[in-house]
Image (cartoon, coloured by chain):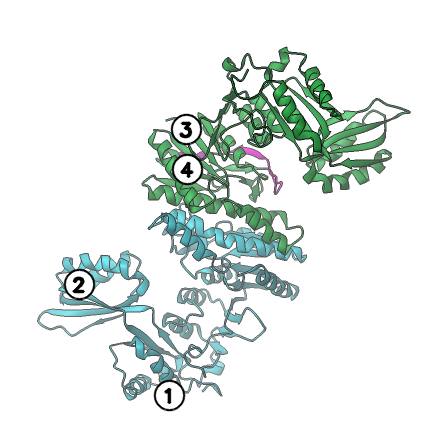
Chain colours: A cyan, B green
């Protein structure tokens, strides 16, 4: 039988009533003849509430214990859904990440999945059960409970979908799909019917919140089709899959704004071979992701090195840079939290070389200065002042014809 | 190093502040040089709150899923305590029942421990950790998460104490020890310094709430010394251990009242061999414990059979008896929920044959009718009307000199 993975986030299972509604929806899918795996997050604010208790007790809670604590959240949501399904005569059994064979590395709080051993899940499906699976969590190679980082229930769903060869991984959210831009900022943004994994990945990495880039990347690698759907109602949502047809004529799929990053500049870095490697190795060793690395032209044997990094990582990053700047003989570093990253994404860019120039032109027309630029074959990102960012997004969205209508 | 097991109930870990206080106490024990295993229940009303959510979703929640749900409670308490201990520089790691090797049978909601495989706990102790262990839960022989029944965190503590050869299992409660009678009913009841496991078992089985008879029985079987102590303050508490010395002269250790049972009578049971066996086998097959079985003298080839059973089990028991009374050709059955069981317990009874007579005399003096009697070598229990029970307890307590003073 075809297998479908359905993933519901914390809002979708945020109350007993909502869990009942999710159960109804799962029963419909099951009655449609599919084998069903449901992945759930913790109910509503559970994760935040548990974190708050831990922070009352300790400024820096022990990471192993913190993972043990937070995994209680999905355990509650999944067993309540299991109860709701069984009460509807739909046989269901819930499994923790550990029980479901989600094996991770040992990095508490942000573990990476290293392997899926879905034997128990497959047996449960074969025995006629709906499998309810805890998102966000796994078991490390040292047999310790781990979590995969905030929002990683999508990742659990996609990874399990890949491991069991599911036909589709449905991501249920409180929006009704992926949009050409954030509709709260751009009122005439249009829902995208189908988008390629490459484009979705660039959009997600550029600040679109609907899907995590980590999950899209895993879906792409394992050839898992994603279907982003609204939790409430039956709107068609957005498919993320290789499907050239309807997109052929479209140059730009969407625009995104990321306001959760800061610009970091290391001043007067000695310009010698290996210096960039030593900087970014030291940062990577702390598992901090950086983006948009720009090195200025060298002057007097030194160069300024800039990059963007998540605001949330700044305290740890500053610790690394304090030591690093001394070690490499740089003048020091500065942090600018007042920036935003505006990105345009579209597979059609490959064959339309003028897109970057058009984007810069739109920003110039709005009197907006561009502080950093980075491009990929299907994406252009510009760092601009944060307070101008929403205006810039609307202008770019309009210029590239992303608004409702024929979508061309 | 000597190992001490410290068990804290739901009230003792009922808030962040109380978890901090428990952590302080554990740190003191650890600094005293002991290896420490801490067993915790779920915080405060967590188990009730989770149960209430499940009952909103289903009238009869799936038992496997229910166990999955409830075990989240201890998980939260134990990891918060783990965080509190590590924050004090006291290395600690928390373990679920499953991780700690608490292997049970497959009876969800009231599983029995069949084996303890404490390898991981012992390794964690040897590595210098305080082990924080979830009470109330285990892993079944079919690898499913189970719970051991309400209040069974004591059982976890005692079983683990036996498995690792702990010197003592300390049970922290919101009272300061075991009393000669419930102090809320008998104001001059006296705290008992030391009581034998046999006596404690009879007291627990007779309605004393401080310890579960299941836990006392396990402690007796494995030779584990119990120490019942107050969670707050440093009062000496009550020791449960084989320790004849100071108790030699004491005839009666305590009196207890059980108001959570009903009297069940099966009317006109055909008096033939095997009929009692078939009745109580059918009841035992439903895992319902009965007590005080009394069979009247046979008349006209039939006899009335009475016993007591927990009020909470009545709905299920009535289902069993409906079918059973027909099968064995009895006239039917009746249930009387208006009873109480008053018990006197004391090892000294063995050598003082007049105790029973004295007890009946006290009740007669109060004008209280005795409906059923059952005795063991160290206990006498009488079933009386529930509305007279507290008066009876006070009268018996006074007659046998259990009040404060020299305790003789």
How busy is the neighbourhood of tag 3: few (under 14 within 10 Å), some, or many (20 plus)? some
Q: Mark 1 lies on which chain?
A: A
Q: Mark 2 points at which residue?
A: A275
Instruction: Please name whichever residue, B53 or A344, is drawn nearer the observer in this view of the structure.
Output: B53
How busy is the neighbourhood of tag 4: few (under 14 within 10 Å), some, or many (20 plus)? many
Determine the secondary structure under disc 1.
helix
Quarter-of-image position of residue B300: top right
Determine the secondary structure under disc 4.
strand
- Looking at the image, residue A102 lies above or below residue B268: below
Q: Name the residue under label 3.
A: B3
| Left or right: where B169 falls relative to B114 | left
Q: Tell me where residue B289 appears, x and y as whole percent.
A: 68, 33
Residue B199 in sight from this viewpoint: yes
Q: Tell me where residue A88 appears, x and y as whole percent.
A: 67, 58
Q: Mark 4 points at which residue?
A: B131
Q: Name the residue under label 1.
A: A399
In the picture, which quadrant includes the N terminus of chain A?
bottom right
- Looking at the image, residue A125 lies above or below residue B381: below
Mark 4 or 2, closer to the camera: 4
Range of residues picked out in magenta: B105-124
Q: Do the residues labelled 2 and 3 touch (CB within 8 Å)?
A: no
In the picture, which quadrant includes the C terminus of chain A?
bottom left
Q: Which chain carries label 4?
A: B
Q: Mark 3 lies on which chain?
A: B
Q: Residue drawn 55% across and 55% down?
A: A78
């Amino acid at each position: 039988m075809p297998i479908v993975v359905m993933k519901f986030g914390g809002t979708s299972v945020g109350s007993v009533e909502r869990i009942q509604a999710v159960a109804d929806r799962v029963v419909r899918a099951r009655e449609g003849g599919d084998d069903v795996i449901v992945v759930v997050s913790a109910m509503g604010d559970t994760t935040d509430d548990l974190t708050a208790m831990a922070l009352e007790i300790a400024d820096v809670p022990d990471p192993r214990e913190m993972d043990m604590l937070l995994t209680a959240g999905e355990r509650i949501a999944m067993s309540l859904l299991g109860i709701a399904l069984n009460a509807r005569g739909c046989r269901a059994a819930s499994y923790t990440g550990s029980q479901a064979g989600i094996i991770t590395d040992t990095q508490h709080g942000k573990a990476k999945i290293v392997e899926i051993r879905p034997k128990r899940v497959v047996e449960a499906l074969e025995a006629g059960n709906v499998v309810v699976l805890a998102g966000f969590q796994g078991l490390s190679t040292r047999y310790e409970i781990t979590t995969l980082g905030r929002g990683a229930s999508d990742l659990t769903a996609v990874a399990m979908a890949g491991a069991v060869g599911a036909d589709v991984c449905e991501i249920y959210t409180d929006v009704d799909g992926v949009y050409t831009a954030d509709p709260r900022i751009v009122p005439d943004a249009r829902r995208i019917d189908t988008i390629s994994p490459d484009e979705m990945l660039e959009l997600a990495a550029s600040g679109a919140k609907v899907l995590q880039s980590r999950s899209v990347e895993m879906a792409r690698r394992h050839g898992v089709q994603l279907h982003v759907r609204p939790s409430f109602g039956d709107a068609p949502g957005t498919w993320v899959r290789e499907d050239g047809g309807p997109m052929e004529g479209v140059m730009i799929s969407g625009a995104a704004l990321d306001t959760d990053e800061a610009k970091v500049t290391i001043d007067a870095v000695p310009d010698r071979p290996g210096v960039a490697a030593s900087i970014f190795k030291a940062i990577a060793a702390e598992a901090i992701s950086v983006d948009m690395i720009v090195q200025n032209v060298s002057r007097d044997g030194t160069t300024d090195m800039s990059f963007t990094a998540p605001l949330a990582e700044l305290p740890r990053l500053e610790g690394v840079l304090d030591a690093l700047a001394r070690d490499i003989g740089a003048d020091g570093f500065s942090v600018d939290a007042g920036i935003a990253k505006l990105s345009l994404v579209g597979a059609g860019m490959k064959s339309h070389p003028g897109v970057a120039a058009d984007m810069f032109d739109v920003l110039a027309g709005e009197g907006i200065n561009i502080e950093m630029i980075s491009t990929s074959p299907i994406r252009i990102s510009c760092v601009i002042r944060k307070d101008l960012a929403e205006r810039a997004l609307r202008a770019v969205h309009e210029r590239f014809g992303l608004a409702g209508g024929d979508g061309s």
